[in-house]
Amino acid sequence: MFWKTGVLIVGCVLLPFCLLGAESSGRWGKSVTFHRTRGKNRPERETSSSSNTGNSSQGHAFTSCRIPLTPAEHEVLDDNTHETGFNGDDGSYVILTWVGDGTGVILVLSTISSPLDSFLEGGSSRLYRSTDYGKSFHDISQSINHTFIKEEFGVSVGPGSSVILTADTPVFGNPGGIIFTSTDAGATFRFIQLPFHLAQPITYHFLNPDYLVALSIDGGLWLSLDFGAKWTKVHDGVHSFSWGAGINLFFSCSQVDAVEAEERGDLLLKRTKDLGRTFTIIHEDIYSFGYIGAFLFFSVMEDSRSPRVMYFSSDQGDSFSQALLPSASTEQFYSILDGDEDMLFMHVDNPGDTYFGTMYTSDDRGILFSKSLERHLFDGQRKSDFTNITSLRGVYLTNKLDVDGHVRSVISFNRGGTWRQLNKPDNVNCGDHVKKCNLHIHGEHSRNNRIVPMLALSEPTAIGLVIAHGTVGDSLSSSQHPDVFVSSDGGYNWRGTLRGPHHYSLLDSGGLLVAVEAHHKGQVKTIKFSTDEGQCWKLYNFTEQSFFFAGLASEPGTKAMSVSVWGFRPEEDGQPMWVAVTIDFQSLITRQCNARDYEEWLAHSTGGDSERNGCVLGLKETYRRLKKQSFCRNGRNFAVSKKQSPCSCTREDYICDYGYYRHVNTSECVRQPVAANKTLDACLNGEEDELLTAGYRKVPSDRCEGGFTPHLQVPTVIQPCGVKPSSEPPGKTTSSVTHFDTLTERLVLILVCAGAALIILLVIVSAVLAVRRVADRTRTPAYSFSNLRLQEDTNGITAEFESIASSNGTACHQDSDEDLLHYHSTNFQGIANTTGQGC
């Protein structure tokens, strides 16, 4: 598999467990790419086997609940099912993109991989447009003069109804590339000749569709302020770029006459905040950078012989600080898993081909990182199973590689503070010989190995709803046959719902689930749908003539009531024909939901009447959501309704601050033990800084009030580094060597200041001798970052650094941080660790 222009192109040959229809959800729309292979001879997938079965065991089979369609329901669906055959279209790829919000406009680009193939095989590019949510399509190829559009770049959709198509033109003999722009959702297009050749898709500004930035094949950074009509080069030698907040634009570039700067870590990180008129150098010698949430992050190779380290900025690069994370050597990498304005999830790879690393969570500055999960799975192809369950606040799901070589799923309900295994589904039991019976969710690792066709699915508008492929037993084993499971409460409880792998989608804000079975061979003609969150399903044959399935396509945002099934049929001449069947369920579910169809639901409730029941990250949240038995539609005007109330703070709302850890025998945070060879440096903003701490800090995003308040008799002052004296606020007295915290020491200082000149000299000599003796006994220890990752054996946490061989074989980690720039859409409570609690 490989990424191109943000759309996952999968080169599979009618393989049921390969995601042929892959989605790329952008800020303004969603693109889906379907691929088919030319030729009549289509190789079959080899049946996977696993020698690593261990004591894993699949749970006893559950029975899917099926309700037959009535003749009247079948007739209604027949009348509202629309099939389109794209006759004479021999494109290998179909890129389907929604334009605008609720416009009903879909653009479909049918193309092939390159013009050379077109010349040799008679292929072409065609552009189709639908204005009724895919019920009918019209060929509008003439609006772009039948120009060949690049498969790699496809269709780019921006804010509002803006669209950009990038033509494929030869580099030699042409001054630049060609783009077609539209501001009316593809009704009309404007031809624009570029003064350069694009190296990657054009990038929109977050808010203003007229502001565009592009990178040319010769490393030029180009800006347009009028939606592509005119372009201005603003910098040369650029490797990568990213919009920040406002009109801040960040980019990395080579220094003058630098050769292989990216490989050596010799890049400059620059910023322009006036659209290219002036520039500021943020840092030298960077390896790579990215921007997510409110954080700018970049890795730095400070010395050619040293590992890379991470820096973060939360103020658009005006200031930055080194993150308190283990450094990454040439065989390791960093990866931002997820992030927002409050915190980041960071994975740091373990040395060697171990296929796992350590997950950390940050504070709201992106500086202080706490260990969240050890042995976090990250396979040889740099794929992580880390998933944000967006249907409920604070829930994350991932997989870990345990010391016995088995992969197990873990889930966190408090943003990585603690992790535990998933509960066994209600309707599935394990055999007597299975010691631990839990549900394990298949993620990117399984999809990459063609075990499942889809990842776990959740949406913010479908409160608490999660649908995923899973296996019940001791661990996740590739030899097991995955089934589909559904949770209605954000991952606390699960239920088996469909046997075998399926493609699935959420419609009507979760009020409607649809699924199509993923077949090993053969073709599809049946869709399954449920109106009770997957408890029972109805089956509908949407076509008389089955076809090879390519993917499901539904409007982004889950508001729609219709879904399109894409595929292709072989024609008599052997050439396949693309087919799209759109099923409109609104005609079947006609009643609009009313107040009696909804219920009040307390999120994160584990039962009981305790005051803390439902408290997560300092808040209780009560949602108004649809009852399972209600047969009605939420509709396009549906909005999530919730009530929030703060909880009283407890120790669970705090994690141990820098220099502290939660002792295994207590719930309190205690100071790290002194170790001569285990110290910690923290140079904040390149200067000496103080961290005044009581040993605790509130978990990012926690909104608790009152209750437990961290308090120490004498707050600890940690003074890392010694580069420059920091500017102190009035009333604060510090020293890089000695801290005068006791009343006696302060009185001595007062007496010294009030004494006569001769007495002062005598007192100074006596005080210095006395203070040095006191300092030797009570001095605050310094901590050096270089050994932070070795603190585990002194704070009650045992780190496991065994090299576990994956079934994928040996991975080759490139000397690159490229995974910094992609973040992935859980934990294992079976081991007693202080995940997310120790620093």
Image: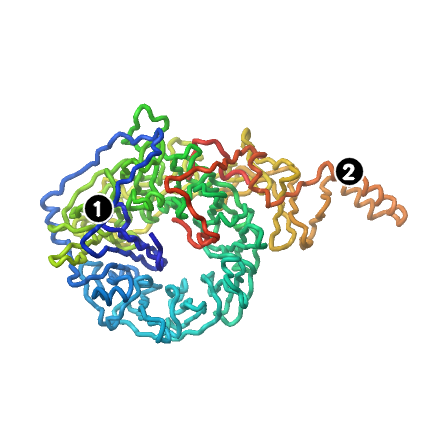
Task: Tell me which residue sits at (78%, 41%) in the image.
Answer: 771
- Front residue (pair 573, 359): 573
In the displayed structure, 278 sits above or below 829; it is below
Q: Position of residue 232 (x, y in %)?
A: 44, 74
In the rendered structure, which amino acid carries the disc numbered 1?
Val
Vertically, is 448 above or below 175? Answer: above
How far apart are labels 1 and 2 at the CA level? 76 Å
Q: Is residue 254 visible?
A: yes
Is 383 situated left or right of 187 in this image? right
How crowded pointer 1 is (Cα within 10 Å; few <14, some 14-19, many 20+) is rated as: many
Judging from the image, what secondary structure is the residue with disc 1 in? strand
Return the residue found at the far right. Answer: 758
For residue 496, side relative to residue 682 (left or right): left
The location of residue 702, given as percent across then percent down, is: 48, 44
Q: Residue furthest top?
A: 432
Quadrant assignment, res 629: top left
715 sits to left or right of 542: right
The structure residue drawn at horizontal position 52% and vertical position 42%, both measured from the top left corner, is: 370
Label 2 amino acid?
Arg
Q: Work out which quarter of the rendered image holds the C terminus and state it.
A: top right
Q: Residue 185's spot in the image, x, y percent?
A: 28, 66
Which of labels 1 and 2 is toward the front? 1
Residue 773 marker: 2
Estimate how packed mark 2 is, as few (under 14), some (14 to 19) or many (20 or more) residues with alpha carbons within 10 Å.
Answer: few
Quadrant of the image occupied by residue 742? top right
Q: Which residue is mark 1?
A: 516
Q: Residue at x 32, y 42 (%)?
A: 466
